[in-house]
Amino acid sequence: MKLKGAEVLIRCLKEEGVDVIFGYPGGVVLPIYDALYSSDIKHVLVRHEQGAAHAADAYARVTGKVGVCLSTSGPGATNLVTGIANAYMDSVPMVAFTGQVPTGLIGRDAFQEADITGITLPITKHNFLVKKGQDLVRTIKEAFHIARTNRPGPVVVDLPRDIMAGDMDFNGYPNEVGLKGYRVVRNCNMGQVLLAVETIQKAERPVIYAGGGVIGSDASELLQELAIKMKIPVATTLMGIGCFPETHYLSLGMLGMHGTRYANYAVSEADLLIAVGVRFDDRVTGKISSFAPHAKVIHIDIDAAEIGKNFGVDIPIVGNVKQVLEEIVPRLQPCEQFTEWHRTIDRWKEEFPLTYSESHEEGRIKPQYVVEQIYYATQGHAIITTEVGQNQMWAAQFYKFTQPRTFITSGGLGTMGFGLPAAIGAKIGRPDMTVIDIAGDGSIQMNIQELCTAVEQRLPIIICILNNHFLGMVRQWQELFYGGRYSYTDISVQPDFVKLAESYGAIGIRVKDYQDVMPVLQEALTVTDRPVLLDFWVEREANVFPMVPPGESLYNMLGGDEE
Amino acid sequence: MKHTLSVVVENQPGVLTRVATLFRRRGYNIDSLTVGRTENPNISRMTIVVDGDDVIIEQVTKQLHKLVEILKIYDITEEPTVDRELALVKVRADSQIRGEIMQIVEVFRARIVDIGRNSLIIEATGDENKINAIEDSLRPFGILELVRTGKVAMLRGAK
Ligand SMILES: Cc1cc2nc3c(=O)[nH]c(=O)nc-3n(C[C@H](O)[C@H](O)[C@H](O)COP(=O)(O)OP(=O)(O)OC[C@H]3O[C@@H](n4cnc5c(N)ncnc54)[C@H](O)[C@@H]3O)c2cc1C
Ligand SMILES: Cc1ncc(C[n+]2csc(CCOP(=O)(O)OP(=O)(O)O)c2C)c(N)n1
């Protein structure tokens, strides 16, 4: 059968089960947009390509499917770059299609030519430039396969215009991929599994350190089974939030730089650390030489290169979290009793709870209070996306997550401007869920144009700006480590966010009194056909505590020990 | 310590860039890198000499393995191998000292491949030590230009 390249592309996407594409058109992708015009794949027109990449990223995180975005060549493609890097750092399955100038013009600095496969080489799991029509179908198959299997990640497919516009034979979509140098990890070393079982069984002060890999492999239930069966306390990374219910008595919340004191103390005192789908990030470990100093460490990760990359471990197990836990959990004898270890942890929890002082100043609300009220208003049942900075940390600390794939945040790259497009992607992926972006007044301005996308799509997402009129997280560091010299972090000059929201056709409400927080949230939750932007004026110089100062060990935390 | 990795890759445009980018991005030191065709036109072989301790070499190997076009990696540092490097050396050589240079060439079983009025080009093949030695011996005469290919290597025996 003869079809245009662009039509073949659409057919292949349908075969992959793609039902939504986030994109933005341009010259060289006209053939693709023409094919989309008569296709039943939903296309969400963003207002900046970065928004398309983040939306596809969040769509993937909430659904577990591969997110898809599309841009034109040159500036369209380079606008995707931050979003691709973001997905790479957080191991999110995504395929980004970029238009490219016709094959005959590649390399001649043609109009809107950018070497996007060159540019994205270090920030993609793999990338392709399709040089011949006959390679198109196989390439798409491989791109999705690579993006979704093993450690997921973004894949770029660069599509020259002539290939999209030209005719080609289409003989169906292949079932198999023929990648010789890429194998899906299917097994794990049983010797290591048995060693892990024996070690877990004998441990006296075990702690689970669980991360993004648990959520990505849909192993949250198994992890809970492990923890509950063996009565092992669970600390999660920022990326692991939601894989273990934070309302459970075994939950230690988040560990690391802004983790709870009890999570960090538990890790520091543990005799066994079970690291599951984590990558020993420096925000987690603090000073690496004093991380988990008394513990034997079991590390389960699908990416062999993560084993020993930052931290030497005792029992590495390369494999899929789900599969490995399926082998480990049934082999364990349940632990029947609470021990001194649990009592120690309970004491830490009592002594060092996550708190803040509730005295609100006139016209300014405590930011933590806003997050707590969001938690109560949604009864803990919502998808929360975040921007980056203090807002992100307070969201992580004060919203109690109980479900995987409900906390969507930019962890590895820390991309300001992620939260709003992510909320769009999340709402499109999970229309049944309430979706809230917890934002900062700085970050929200980085992709504010996506409000227009949300209005056009009639998405009832709620944006909660914790407006401190500062680049708060940077200001906090300046206060603590640079003698209070607030160099270029005061952003009091800013738009009227309420009017801005209204001008886009969204609802905007300003809240300065803590007593209004709950009623306004409840009102916002009743809206069904458009976004709502809530501009909460919060205490300007509130800090995120506790905090491990950079380069310190997890023992040396600042704050969170008063009151 | 220097390790020699023999890396079998799919012969696709861009593989070399991927490998080079990986080394640059992760801050590993390439000592030398050669790449060439093999008996199979779809497959190339790279010989990479990389400097680093065992932990680094393990990381290099694991990170390389993640590149989709890389098929196999052998660390042949400790294995019995044949390895060779080729060098072309242009030395200053007026008629009085030519004889002396020819003797050196003889000793190293190298060859003279070009004779100019005041210079010679010498071609030498051998393992790294031999090439170093010939370079050192020729230096006093005045090396005008020198190019070394970097190492290619193959395991001995039938493996
Ligand atoms: C302002 C700011 C502050 C931060 N503060 C903190 C903090 O206090 N605490 C904190 O924890 N983080 C913090 N972070 C986030 C931090 O930077 C890292 O993004 C995060 O800690 C990494 O989480 P992770 O270890 O779970 O790894 P991820 O990035 O989620 O990586 C997942 C790991 O699991 C593996 N994996 C993936 N799929 C599978 C599978 N199927 N089977 C097995 N393994 C798999 C991967 O190979 C990888 O090693 C902060 C970020 C920002 C921006
Ligand atoms: C794109 C980008 N630029 C700069 C930074 C550095 N940075 C980290 S947090 C932060 C401040 C964020 O301010 P705001 O969005 O107002 O949030 P707050 O910390 O006040 O909650 C900055 C500038 C970043 N993470 N991302």
Image (spheres, coloured by chain):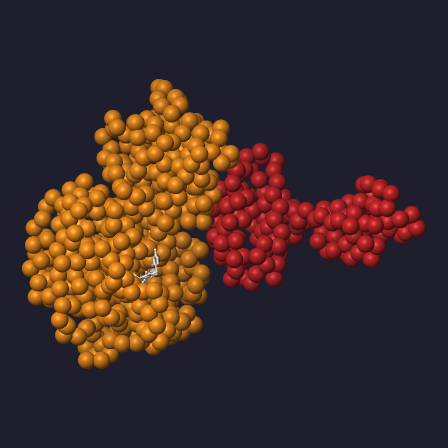
Chain colours: A orange, B red
**Residue A296 at what x, y percent from top left?**
38, 69
Q: Is residue B60 above or below residue A115?
A: below
Asked if residue B108 lies left or right of residue A40, the reply is right
Residue A348 seen in render:
no
Which picture quadrant has residue B135?
bottom right
Q: Is residue A354 above or below residue A212?
A: below
Residue B94 seen in render:
yes
**Measuring 42% from the left and 57% from the top, which residue is drawn there?**
A306
Asked if residue B58 lies left or right of residue A154, the reply is right
In this view of the protein, which residue sits in the foreground, A160 or A253? A160
In this view of the protein, which residue sits in the foreground, A61 or A415? A415
Q: Indicate the quadrant containing the N terminus of chain A: top left, top right, bottom left or bottom right.
A: top left
In this view of the protein, which residue sits in the foreground, A221 or A449? A449
Farthest top residue? A1
Ligand 1 in which quarter = bottom left
Q: Is residue A371 above or below residue A294?
A: above
Q: Indicate the quadrant containing the C terminus of chain A: top left, top right, bottom left or bottom right.
A: bottom left
Asked if residue B90 lies left or right of residue A337, the reply is right
**Residue B38 at what x, y percent from top left?**
61, 38
Asked if residue A535 lies left or right of residue A256, the reply is left
**Residue A478 at what x, y percent from top left?**
34, 71
Farthest front residue? A493
**Measuring 36% from the left and 19% from the top, which residue is drawn there?**
A2
**Measuring 31% from the left and 40% from the top, which residue is drawn there?**
A69
**Residue A249 at what x, y percent from top left?**
18, 68
In this view of the protein, which residue sits in the foreground, A155 or A465? A465
**Measuring 28% from the left and 50% from the top, which residue is drawn there?**
A447
How many numbered marks have been drawn onto this rendered protein structure?
0
